[in-house]
């Protein structure tokens, strides 16, 4: 688990020590104080966010500080102006000042107390129960996987850059993000879901404007130096849910609650939830036929050709199976070289979108014929670590650092 964002509606549920710290400077209003234009807009919409205030504070001792925003909301039916507090924070950084280390669900109470202390330090106060009962609007499930010396981060990311999540997901940002950082980040994007893969160590060392993590602390860089962690690679897998509706539909299945039940902060610390979500999100990637073809380990064209043809001949010895073998090999080879998304897009340029279903059928057959081919050592290492789901600690990372040292 990494980022959590929750919202608290009703100004009576929180207090602010210094409103002048907000930008723009905060001021309370009643419905009668709204301008004519604002009241017209509110009546048209029924309920509308009017103003946004962002808490600006100086970092103290380079320690982690949660992000705080307040939204002013007007309700025309009740002729009421109210205020909603939005808090965004990193679970491991709140606990450890770094997201290299991983938290556990059992640290729930400790997290709330430390978060409350950090918020109190910047003048934002609320009861622990208020935070715990707050609805979640964003949550990022994450896992760090230290890599042994014989497995390269760049080779893993190259494999992941060939993945696709199909038309159900908009992956338009993958090319932009890869080119921006020389292929060091792979990002499968949808409006409400993200699958992101990168080197966590390199991301800490990278300038803020080029990194995935925008909440950097000096402590993290010091940690790398003190424990000589800058000589290892840590594969970072993030699965992000960025909308309340998506969070409800995804998590209530595991929590065994009705799908429309709001997800509260307390729900996120249900024992075993993090592991289930991570493994399920990984399964969504790995089980797509085109991704199975992209991740097979062999780069030898003849080995791939012979494997597919022998498997097809074993299944059925007629001419139709030979045709299947030919186009299955062609699909597998193109996806290995060009990537699943590119192959799908180029096919759609030539044939109409109606051919998409037929392409899916052919991809499924090709993946079945190539099924017995192993995944690469890097993918197998990551999958094994995700299934074991062991907490990454400073001791874990130090062990990998010692193994990476040259003799």
Image: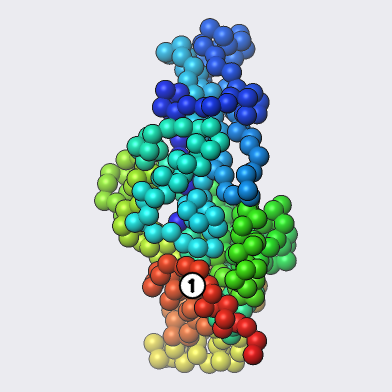
Q: Residue 227 location in percent, x, y?
A: 59, 71
Q: Residue at x 65, y 29 (%)?
A: 23
Q: Is residue 138 left or right of residue 183?
A: left
**Looking at this view, is 113 or 253 the one in front?**
113
Is residue 313 shown to the viewer in this render?
A: yes
Q: In this rendered view, identify the residue nearer to me: 400 or 239.
A: 400
Q: On the rendered structure, is 130 left or right of 346?
A: left
Measured from the top left, where is residue 244 in percent x and y?
A: 43, 41
Crowdedness of circle 1 by 10 Å Cα count: few (<14), some, many (20+)? few
Q: Quadrant of residue 201?
A: bottom right
Q: Is residue 100 above or below residue 240?
A: below
Vertical comparison of 82 with 395: above or below:
above
The percent position of residue 318, horizontal first and vertical second, equals 43, 88
Q: Nearer the viewer, residue 346 or 118?
A: 118
Front residue of this view, candidates 92 and 236: 92
Q: Residue at x 39, y 59 (%)?
A: 104
Which residue carries the number 1 mark?
395
Q: Residue at horizontal 32%, vertical 44%?
A: 259
Q: Could you tell me which secondary element the residue under label 1 belongs to?
A: helix
173 lies above or below 14: below
Q: Looking at the figure, which quarter contains the N terminus?
A: bottom left
Q: Identify the residue shown where x is 50% and y is 50%.
A: 94
């Amino acid at each position: 688990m990494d980022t959590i964002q929750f919202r608290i509606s009703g100004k009576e549920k929180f207090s602010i020590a210094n409103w002048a710290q907000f930008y723009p400077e905060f001021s309370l209003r009643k419905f009668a104080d709204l301008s004519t234009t604002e009241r017209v807009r509110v009546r048209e919409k029924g309920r509308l966010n009017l103003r946004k205030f962002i808490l600006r504070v100086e970092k103290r001792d380079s320690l982690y500080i949660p992000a705080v925003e307040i939204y002013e909301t007007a309700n025309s039916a009740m002729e009421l102006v109210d205020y909603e507090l939005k808090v965004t924070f990193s679970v491991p950084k709140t606990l450890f000042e770094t997201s290299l280390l991983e938290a556990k669900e059992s640290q729930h109470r400790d997290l709330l107390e430390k978060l409350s202390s950090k918020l109190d330090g910047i003048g934002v106060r609320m009861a622990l129960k208020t935070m715990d009962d707050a609805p979640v609007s964003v949550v990022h499930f994450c896992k760090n996987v230290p890599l042994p010396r014989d497995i390269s981060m760049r080779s893993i990311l190259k494999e992941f850059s060939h993945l696709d999540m199909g038309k159900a997901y908009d992956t338009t940002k993958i090319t932009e993000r890869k080119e921006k950082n020389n292929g060091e980040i792979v990002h499968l994007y949808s409006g409400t879901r993200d699958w992101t893969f990168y080197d966590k160590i390199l991301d800490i060392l990278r300038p803020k404007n080029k990194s995935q993590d925008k909440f950097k602390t000096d402590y993290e860089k010091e940690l790398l130096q003190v424990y000589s962690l800058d000589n290892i690679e840590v594969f970072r897998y993030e699965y992000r849910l960025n909308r309340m509706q998506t969070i409800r539909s995804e998590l209530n299945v595991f929590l065994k609650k009705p799908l429309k039940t709001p997800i509260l902060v307390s729900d996120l610390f249900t024992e075993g939830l993090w592991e289930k979500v991570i493994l399920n999100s990984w399964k969504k990637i790995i089980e797509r036929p085109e991704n199975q073809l992209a991740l097979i380990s062999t780069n030898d064209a003849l080995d791939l050709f012979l494997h597919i043809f022998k498997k097809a001949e074993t299944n059925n010895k007629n001419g139709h199976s030979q045709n299947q073998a030919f186009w299955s090999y062609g699909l597998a080879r193109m996806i290995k070289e060009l990537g699943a998304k590119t192959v799908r897009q180029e096919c759609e340029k030539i044939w109409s979108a109606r051919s998409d279903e037929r392409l899916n059928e052919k991809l499924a057959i090709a993946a079945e014929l190539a099924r017995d081919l192993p995944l690469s050592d890097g993918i197998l290492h990551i999958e094994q670590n995700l299934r074991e789901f062991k907490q990454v600690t400073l001791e874990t990372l130090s062990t990998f650092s010692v193994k990476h040292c040259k003799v």
